[in-house]
Amino acid sequence: MLSFLWYIIIGGILGWLGGLIMGKDIPGGVIGNIIAGIIGAWIGGSLLGHWGPKISDFYILPTLLGTILLILIVGFIMRIMGKASA
């Protein structure tokens, strides 16, 4: 149970840092940050492998890079959907 809580906390922090680095707000607030951090960890681990410092099953550098990539993709999709409805 405690490892699950750490997973949520670290995922949220890394999602927030990714949004902070990109200068964009992640939709959904805290829940959005947690989801972005967890999905970013999956993307970063899949594309870049597992390396660098590790905290609670998150490799920091691949997770941040994966989260940044996720934010870019979501921002691009949101921009396209905004233009399509206008």
Image (cartoon, rainbow, N blue to C red):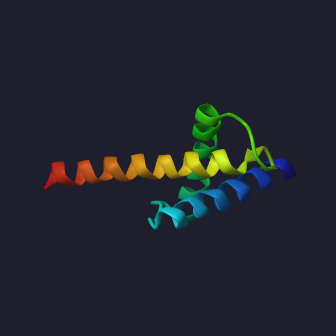
Q: Position of residue 39 (x, y in %)?
A: 58, 43
Establish if 49 lies above or below 11.
above
Position of residue 29 in the picture relative to residue 9 (left or right): left
Which of the 4 image quadrants contains residue 41? top right
On the picture, is 9 further left or further right than 66? right
Q: Which image quarter is the C terminus in?
A: bottom left
Using residue 78 as the reference point, say whether residue 52 is left or right of it. Answer: right
Q: How many marks?
A: 0
Q: Position of residue 66 (x, y in %)?
A: 56, 45
Say whether residue 32 is left or right of residue 3: left
Looking at the picture, how far across and down is residue 40, in whole percent? 58, 45
Camera-nearest residue between 6 and 51? 51
Q: What is the quadrant of residue 16 in the picture? A: bottom right
Residue 1 is at least partly visible in this image = no
**Considering depth in this image, is 30 or 40 the residue closer to the camera?**
40
Q: At x 74% / y 40%, what residue is drawn?
A: 51
Q: Quadrant of residue 42?
A: top right
Q: Residue furthest left?
A: 86
Residue sitting at 18 percent across and 53 percent down?
A: 83
Q: Residue at x 67, y 62 (%)?
A: 13
Residue at the far right in the pictured view: 2
Residue 2, can we see it?
yes
In the image, 61 versus 58, the foreground residue is 61
Residue depicted at x 72% and y 56%: 10
